[in-house]
Image: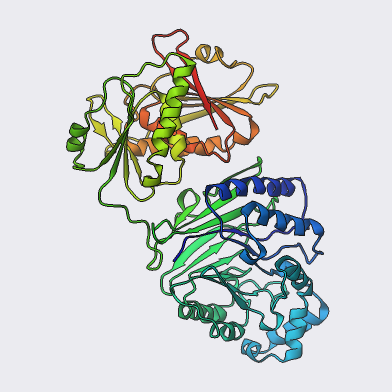
Amino acid sequence: MKKYRWVHLSDIHFAYKDYYSNRLRDELFKLLKEISRQNKVNFLFITGDLTDKNADYTEDLYRFIDDLLNILGLDENHFFMVPGNHDTERCQLRELVLRGIERKDYDCIYNLEEDAINTLISSQNKYFKLYKKLKKEDYPIQRIHFVKRIDGANIIHLNTSWLCGMDGQEGNIFIGVDKLYEVLKEEDITSESLNIAIGHHSFDCLHSKEQKQLSGLFKDFNIDFYLSGHIHQSSVCYNYHIDTHFCSCRQMRSDSYDSGGLVIGNIDTENGDNYIKFYVWKQEGYWAPDTDVGPQAPNGVYKIDSPKFPLKKFKEKPIVVIHKTLNTPINKEKLLNDMGFGNVLVYQYPFANVQINTKEEWMKHKENTERFIKSIISRLENNVVHIFPLSQIPLLIYMGYLFQDDNNNIKIYQLDENGEWVLDSNDANSIPLKITFIESNPKTRKLIVVVEVSSKISDSDIDVYVNTTENSILRFTIDEPERFKVLYASQVREIKKKFRKEMEKYINDYDEIHLFCAVPAGLAVEIGRCILKSMWPKVFLYNYRRNNTPRYEFAFDIN
C-alpha cells in the first residue's frame, strides 16, 4: 500500500457569512498551504452541508473549493464530497413521503416504489448540479450511494441525507443499506486497498437497525475509515470488531455554539506513520491543535494502531544525538557504556567549549545547528532518539524548533547536579507554574515572554532590548527558581504543556515575540518544539551571560 494523506472538511455552511467565519476560511488557506508544503496531500474530502438551509450555491462557493484544490495541488478527480441535510430541500411532498414511511415498519424502505424514491432524491437536485460543476461528471442519482476508485484507494460515497428532513431524526436516520449493498457487491474492494467511506451523518445519528447492518457491510467489504460531520464536533474511535476507524470533523464556520475545525489523515504503512490530526479554530483568530477530541487523541493526534495499520515500530537500536557546546565535549564511549546503549548510531555536534561573543558567531552556530539537525532528521521518524543537550539556550531552542512537535519517539536527557544524565523518575515532584500576563496600554505588536525556572530574570536586563513598560509581558515562573529544580522528563512535559496552551492565546495578536528563558537544557529543546512554523510570528531569542553587563544578549531570530 502506498502513502496516503488527506484533508477532511465538513459542514461548510457557505451561505453563513460573518466576520468570524470569513476570517476562518481565509486563514484556512494559509494553514493548508503549510500542510501541503510539508507533505503531499492526495485527497480532499468534504462531508456535507456545503450550503446553509438549502440556500443557493453561489460563485463564491465554487471559487472557495477551486482555491482549496489549487492550494493542495489536486484536480477534481482527487476531490470527493457527499450531501448533507442542509443540501436537501424540505418541501411538503417530501415530508408526506417521509411521514408515510414513519407510520409503517421501517423495513418498507427496502421496498420503496420508484416514484417515492424519485420524490426523495429530487430534493437534492441543486446539490447534484453543484456536483457536476465541481466534479465535471454527473452524480449517479439512481444508485444513491456509489464508489470511486483512484490511486489504489476506494472512496465509498454514502448519501446519508436522502431519507432525512424532519425534526427529531437524530438516532433514527436510515440510509438504505440495501442500496449500498447492491453497489458494494459490484466492486472489487479488497483488504489490500485503502477503503474510505464518507457520509454526512455520524454513525450515532443512524437508527440502531441501520447501524447493525452497516457495521456488517463495513466488516465484509473491508472499510477502513468512516469520515463524517454533522455534529460540529471532533471525535474519533475504533471498532475492533469490524476493524473500522470512525472520525467526525468540526464545521467550517465559526459561531457562538461550536468552533470550526479540520482533520488531516496520514497513512504510511511502510514506516507505520499512521495518524489522524485534528485542528480547531480559535476565536482569537488562529488555528491550533484540537486538544478537546478526547483521551484517544492527546494533543489533537490520534495514533492509528490496528491490524491493517499497526503503529510505528521503532528499531531496536536507538539513535543518540549529542548537542553540547558548553565546556568539554562528551566522551561518547563512556556515555554509551553508562547508558547501556552499546554499539549504536551517534550524531555529535562537532563543536565544544564554545564561546559565542559576536553576531557573526551566533549566526555561524545557528547555521551549523540547522545543518546538523537536517542531516539526521530523516532518520528520526523510524527510531527512538535519545538527545543529550548542554549548549547555549538559543541554540537548544532552535534545535527543538527544527524537530517541531510531530514525533513522540524523542527522549531528552538532562545533566543532574552530580554530573549524571537522567531521564525521568517515579519520585519526580509536580512543579507548580505561575502564569501572569500584563498587557501594554496602548497595545503594541511586541510580546515579551519570560520563562523563569533556573533563575529569575530582571526587567532591567530585558529593557536593554525591549521596553518592559511599553510592551505586553507574559511571564512563566516557578516558586523559587533554581538550577536542577526541573530535572525530569515528566516535569518538563508538564511545564511544556502549560507553556504551549498559554502561548496559543496570544501568538496571533503579535508580530514579534521576544523570548527570555532561564531554563534547563531539556526544557529549552521542548520550548523550541512548541514554536510551530505555520502558526507563530517571528521569535527573537536571547542568551544569558552571568558575568556580562547586561546579562542577556540578543542571539538571533527564528520563524
Q: Quadrant of the N terminus?
A: bottom left
Q: Quadrant of the C terminus?
A: top right
Q: Give the percent coordinates (x, y) of residue 188.
A: 51, 80
Above or below, 19 against 415 in this view is below
Q: Give the percent coordinates (x, y) of residue 485.
A: 33, 27
Identified at 48% across, 48% down, the residue is: 299
Residue 267 visible in the shown view: yes
Q: Is residue 255 left or right of residue 500?
A: right
Identified at 81% across, 60% down, the residue is: 58
Q: Is residue 207 left or right of residue 499?
A: right
Structure colour scheme: rainbow
Q: How many marks?
A: 0
Residue 11 sits in which quadrant? bottom right
Residue 415 sits in which quadrant? top left
Residue 518 visible in the shown view: no
Above or below, 144 against 279 in this view is below
Identified at 71% across, 45% down, the residue is: 23
- Front residue (pair 312, 413): 312
Q: Residue furthest top?
A: 549
Q: Give the percent coordinates (x, y) of residue 450.
A: 50, 24
Q: Is residue 446 left or right of residue 306?
A: right
- Front residue (pair 374, 26): 374
Q: Give the percent coordinates (x, y) of residue 536.
A: 57, 36
Q: Is residue 220 left or right of residue 484?
A: right
